[in-house]
Amino acid sequence: MSPAFRHQYGVFWKALMTFDNKTIEQVTEAWGIKAADLFASATLMRPYEGGDERTRNGIMKELEGKTPAERHYEMQQRMKQGIRDMLADEEKWPKELIFIGRNMRIVQGNNQYLGSPVNRVKMMGQWASRSLYEDPNLPWARRVGNAWRHFVFKGVLALTDVAFYFFKIRQWLGFGGGMEDEMEKRMKDIAQDFGVELQHEVFEG
């Protein structure tokens, strides 16, 4: 992995966790990706809630008044277009993303299979932020600044533990699954909003 890409990926993940949409768009544009919100959701493996929902709102508006069959066909076309948007400029697309994406899927699958014992999203955010102040290629002044921001960022990430332990306690009490199960359910609910009924596990490998 090149130092430049490692830095970009760390910036991208930190932006995902802080809902920094401007930075997300800047990084994805540099990677030749047009559908930043779709790529954000694909990276997190859960709905990205910090965007302006332009893609979702646009799709929902187009689906108004259509029959279930028409909605299903329209969504198939939009999914194909979404993939084309994410691969808008293949020359800019970092090949490392393919390897990282597959790796992330394996980690997510294992975490879900084991009952979500760890807060996967928080761990990724922490390591992304940490990499920015440990980067030896950055000037010391920037590394010190990033170290301070990392300290503040850890406080922000602690808020994700509220949701994580809520689902963990609910799981212990037998009232539902873990955090990964909840994220999969939400992905299915969003698909249903678009008229798509998922007959298999969303994250099935």
Image (cartoon, rainbow, N blue to C red):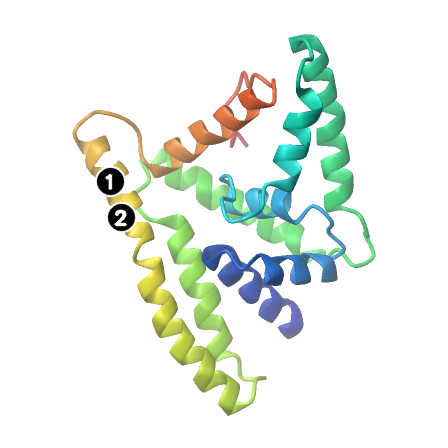
Q: How far across and how far down the image is residue 159, in percent?
A: 31, 54
Label 1: how many Cα within 10 Å (few below 14, some 14–19, many 20+): few
Contact check, label 2 and label 1, Cβ < 8 Å: yes
The span from disc 2 to disc 1 (Cα, nearest Å) is 6 Å
Quarter occupied by residue 84: top right
Q: Residue at x 50, y 55 (%)?
A: 19
**Residue found at the far left of this picture:** 173
Most foreground residue, 50 or 82: 50
Identity of the amino acid at label 2? Val
SS for tag 1? helix
Q: How far across and how far down the image is residue 110, in percent?
A: 41, 40
Identity of the amino acid at label 1? Phe
Is 146 located above or below residue 158 in the figure? below
Q: How far across and how far down the image is residue 100, in percent?
A: 59, 53
SS for tag 2? helix
Residue that carries the numbered disc 1 in the rendered image:
166
Q: Is residue 101 left or right of residue 90?
A: left
Residue that carries the numbered disc 2 in the rendered image:
162
Quarter occupied by residue 56: top right
Q: Residue at x 58, y 46 (%)?
A: 52
Q: Is residue 148 left or right of residue 67?
A: left
Q: Quadrant of the N terminus?
A: bottom right
For residue 58, which numbered disc appears in the image? none
Q: Quadrant of the C terminus?
A: top right
